Amino acid sequence: MDVVEIVNVHRGRNVAFNVFSKVFTDVPSDQTDKFFAVTAGHMASIAASSCNSSLLNGAGLLSAVYGTSDFENADMESTRLARSRDFTKLFALNEVSLYESVYVSPEKLIKQDAWSEVKAFYLSNFFKRVDDDRTIEDHVSMELQFMGLLSKNIAD
């Protein structure tokens, strides 16, 4: 791999991490579906020109879920209610926690040791949430944003 390829991989990782961050932020909406569709199309084209079996597998899974590899023309609206129910059942009703501290601590509470560690790690890497963002630092969407920032910084 040459430097240009490495830079492009990290630019792609930045986009992918930010897309996944949006996916875990809230229930699906028209706006997030459009954002996902455009990005998934780009990710699928990158996977198609790659020898990376994980990328190819991921693109195949996305195609299977949406019934097409033409994401920009996929009928996202017809599946939005079902996806919203799944999101609510899994995350809003706490079948699965979106917070690392809840997931890893014996007490299953927010703002435990993992939160403190993540917050300190963000600080040491000059990452700070936007002032009006009330998301707790160890929320999976915030951790994915941070991974995107690291990938962007590497690419830059």
Image: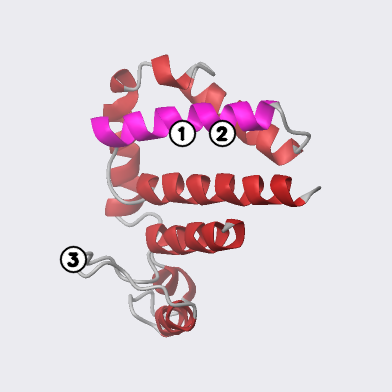
**Which one is in front, 79 or 13?**
13
Q: In the image, is 26 to the left or to the right of 23? A: left
* The quadrant where residue 88 appears: top left
| Dot 2: element | helix
Residue 24, position in %: x, y? 37, 50
The question of residue 116 being in magenta is answered with: no
Contact between marks 2 and 3 (CB within 8 A): the answer is: no
Q: Using the rendered image of the protein, determine whether residue 29 is visible from the camera's viewpoint.
A: no
- Identify the residue at image location x=37%, y=54%: 95
Dot 2, crowdedness within 10 Å: few (<14), some or many (≥20)? some
Pointer 3 local density, CA inside 10 Å: few below 14, some 14–19, many at least 20: few
* Three-letter residue code for mark 1: Thr
Query: Is residue 70 in sight in this rendering?
Result: yes
Which quadrant of the rendered structure holds the C terminus?
A: bottom right
Q: Which mark is residue 43?
A: 2
Identify residue for label 3.
132
- The type of residue carrying mark 3 is Asp
Looking at the picture, which amino acid does disc 2 mark?
Met
Q: Residue 143: x, y in percent?
A: 45, 64
Label 3 element class: loop
**Foreground residue among 5 and 134:** 5
In the image: residue 14, left or right of residue 112: right
In the image, what residue occupies the spot 66% across and 32% down? Answer: 47
- Pick out the residue farthest to the right: 1
Question: Does the residue at mark 1 contact the one at mark 2 (Cβ under 8 Å)?
Answer: yes
Q: Residue at coordinates 36% horizontally, 16% vertically from top-left?
A: 75
Residue for badge 1: 39
Q: Disc 1 to disc 3, how far (Cα)?
A: 26 Å
Which scheme is used to colour this image of the protein?
Answer: secondary structure
Task: Provide the residue span drawn in magenta.
Answer: 30-48
Q: Quick check: 106 left or right of 133?
A: right
